[in-house]
Image (cartoon, rainbow, N blue to C red):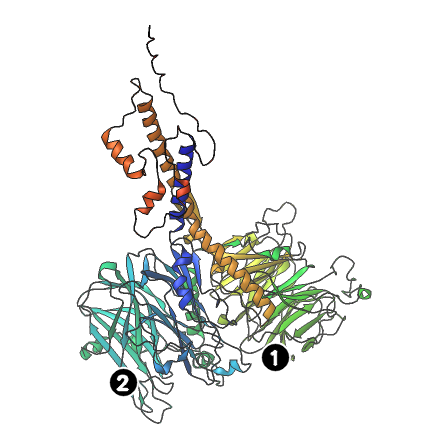
Amino acid sequence: MAGLVSNLLIMFLVFQNVCLGFRSPLSVFKRYKETTRLLSNECPGSDRPVISIGLSDFALDIRMRGVTPKQSDTYLCMSVPLPVDDEAYVVDFKPHASMDTVHHMLLFGCNEPSSTENYWDCDKGTCKDKSNILYAWARNAPPTRLPKGVGFRVGGETGGRYFVLQVHYGDISAFRDKHKDCSGVTLHLTHQKQPLIAGMYLMMSVNTVIPPGEKVVDADIACHYKRFPMHLFAYRVHTHRLGKVVSGYRVRNGQWTLIGRQSPQLPQAFYPVEHPVDVSYDDILAARCVFSGEGRTTETHIGGTANDEMCNFYIMYYMEAKHAVSYMTCTQNVNPEIFRNIPQEANIPIPVKSDMLKMMHGHHEETKDTDKSSLLQQTKKEEEEILDQDFHIEEAVEWPGLDLKLGQVSGLALDPENNLVIFHRGDHVWDENSFDSRFVYQQRGLGPIEQNTIIVLNPSNAKLLNSMGKSLFYLPHGLSIDKNGNYWATDVALHQVFKLGANNKEPLLILGVALQPGSDKSHFCQPTDVAVDPITGSIYVSDGYCNSRIIQFSPNGLYVMQWGEETSLGRARPGQFRIPHSLALIPDFSQLCVADRENGRIQCFGLETGEFIREIKHKSFGRELFAVSYAPGGLLFAVNGMPYPGEAEPVQGFVMNFSTGEIIDTFIPVRKSFEMPHDVVASADKTVFVGDVHARTVWKFASTEKMEHRSVKKAGIEVQEIKESETIVEARLKNNPESTESLKKQEKQHLVQQTRTGVSFVLITTLLIIPVVVLLAILVFIRWRKTTVCGADGEHKLDSSSGRILGRLRGKGSSGLNLGNFFASHKGYSRKGFDRLSTEGSDQEKDEDDGTDSEEECSAPPPPSAPSSS
């Protein structure tokens, strides 16, 4: 029996070693880690560009390596190798860039980049071989979404082995502070074969000439399509300054079907094809760019500089995998006559707001009044495309910020680096003894708060990055941060509004008179919140608990105007407030939205006029709505108050479609419970933070697309995979060596933990199944042998086939399993370490190695007695 146990143990160890030899995600990325170049430590994610996501998926972070462009209209390129050798598919993109610094980005796939440097001037080119554009981004555009089952094929025998990122820096005035840029894109890749392969069809004019002063110049492109059917799902237009409108069509039997039409002066991202368009053999693909040479004194030709022009219409399509072609071009006009029948819309320019032109081209021009309707319509269209995604908000339960020791949390904001900034009251509280009937603060004897009331946290791990505000505030309330990183805070005890630099101890600007409530142009009465227009710099203050108004100030603090009044009896009318408690500025729509707390609603007003635009009110808000926040892409977030006795509406968070006001989702925390959620702030990636003034804590919530909640059943184990945005969202730290080093260490541990998760399923399943199978086989063999050895006739013979099988496994002695001899029979294998474990002889004999007697499994009948001699 001891020999049997030894055999079983040995076989288990052998199979375990075999299992551990299976290639894990870490080994998959080993080549990548050895060949990738060192990145700047100032760039988030530079020390872990590859992140494992489950068993077959991974994320690849492609970022500029901490560059500072020296002049405007700089094009910089960098390359990243595909971290795996075998075929993979790009199924999603997530941009990391801001229009403040980046004009646009393009991502190419190819086999040989134009340079091996960390980054290079794109005048050298992007790729030495044929390149395929995979992705384009401009002006905080919505991320490109590939349809389900569609992916760009990379790696393997036919796909590109490198990604090349091209970033165009238009106006470099944002780099006056010499900061380093880390713009880029995160790719979601999978090894799972996709049934449909994505590709790019580029229509481009190469010989257009625009005469100076010419009002309308058409550039036409047309080609016959001679391949297998393709299905179009996205398009992108591109010109320089003279382009007015670009349109693309499919022409079939004389019928023109619109693929897409857009102003090239609006965000040059990929936009979805509104109505599905398929292209079959012998169809014609046609495109027209409309230019104006007005304002030019010389001819303008097609070229790559800002003074040249371009006419490009990109089509993103998918085909069946067996017929897929990844890249096609059309640079001709095979049939100029057909353009006589092009729809008239192709020559109707799309008006664009002048400040949009300034942002798109990176040049400071004087803003002029123009028609805003088309811009708002376009922004609404972008918003609706984003809202077409089905997602859900859930608490990020791993976030440690819930355990911070805080005072009453009154305000939250996100700085330009997306760090979380918390405004709290330290050891001060607002209670019934704080104010008299005239709203004068009664606890001045306590002095200002002696703790730092403003703390800056890393949004991923709640690491403290900075703190300030000591001995400055009495009862903090609202907080916002402008595009330059200045803090704007209100104090209801002081009745003042403060502008603070992130690194300044003294305020840069103070509005209101300390400790003096009032209702004129220079006084506030318990002001609640501040919002700053990122374009004009105008300051908006909600005032407040004892005034019912919104006041606008110029960027330097001069009074401009005000609107609002106290709510009258009966139903609250537009423009009336009962505590305007929180502000959300929506620059895309030039609106300011106010959480009208005690009226339980949101009111939105025009920024320039203060005119009422609309109300958002739902029964589920209950009687009180405390705070509101806007996220780029058309999402409005809000939190309500505790229900009154006898009312059923719970305290919760809301996600709304800004355009329609419709509630898309609600959310509540898993850990602890909302008591009085006082403020909410949301980022572009739909990460949401809620601060609670009674619970004295901050919750983090993250969006999880409902379509990506899926259960995978394999080997009887159910695994729920939930892809959360923060898996690939990197924390952006200030230039703090200690904080950066600590975060890198934690991120490295997180990567190892993620990778182990990917390995665990295969390893555990293998270790569980293989030993069981081996054990069953051995038990069957033992049962058979026992039956044979202990049979009625008592014979020990084995049949010939069994003997041959065992003979292959046994060593010199035909009665034992010798692993040393078995592995030694394979060339080059050392038997060192196996000799001692050799089990020569049967399990009925004494094991001389351990000095113990083995148990007998059965006994042969005793030999017959010898006949006695007489």
The correct choice, above or below, for 714 with respect to 274 in the image is: above
Q: Label 1: state its secondary structure.
A: loop
Query: Looking at the image, which residue sits at the far top?
Result: 870
- The structure residue drawn at horizontal position 61% and vertical position 50%, both measured from the top left corner, is 673
Other residues around mark 2 within 10 Å, as few (<14) / some (14–19) / many (≥20): some
Residue 566: horizontal and vertical position, in percent?
66, 64
Quick one: 684 or 573, which is closer to the camera? 684
Please identify the residue farthest to the right as the structure is shown: 445
Q: Residue at x 39, y 30 (%)?
A: 843
Indicate which disc, 1 or 2, sits on the residue closer to the N terminus.
2
Closest to the observer, 744 or 224: 744
Q: Which residue type carries mark 1?
A: Pro
Judge whether 722 appears above or below 181 on screen. Answer: above
Q: Which residue is mark 2?
A: 208
Quarter of the C terminus within the rendering: top left
Residue 203 visible in the current orientation: yes
Residue sitting at the far front: 870
Q: Is residue 291 left or right of residue 180?
A: left
Which label sits on residue 555? 1
The amino acid type of the residue labelled 2 equals Thr
Q: Quadrant of residue 24?
A: bottom left
Q: Position of residue 261 (x, y in %)?
A: 33, 72
Image quadrant containing the N terminus: top left
**Foreground tag (1 vs 2):** 2
Which image quadrant is residue 412 in? bottom right
Disc count in the image? 2
| Viewer-closest of 605 and 774 | 774
- Of residues 494 and 80, the one nearer the viewer is 80
Q: Is residue 479 toward the left or the right of residue 308 in the image? A: right
Disc 1/disc 2 C-alpha distance (Å): 45 Å
* Callout 2: SS: loop
| Numbered tag placed on residue 255 in the rendering | none
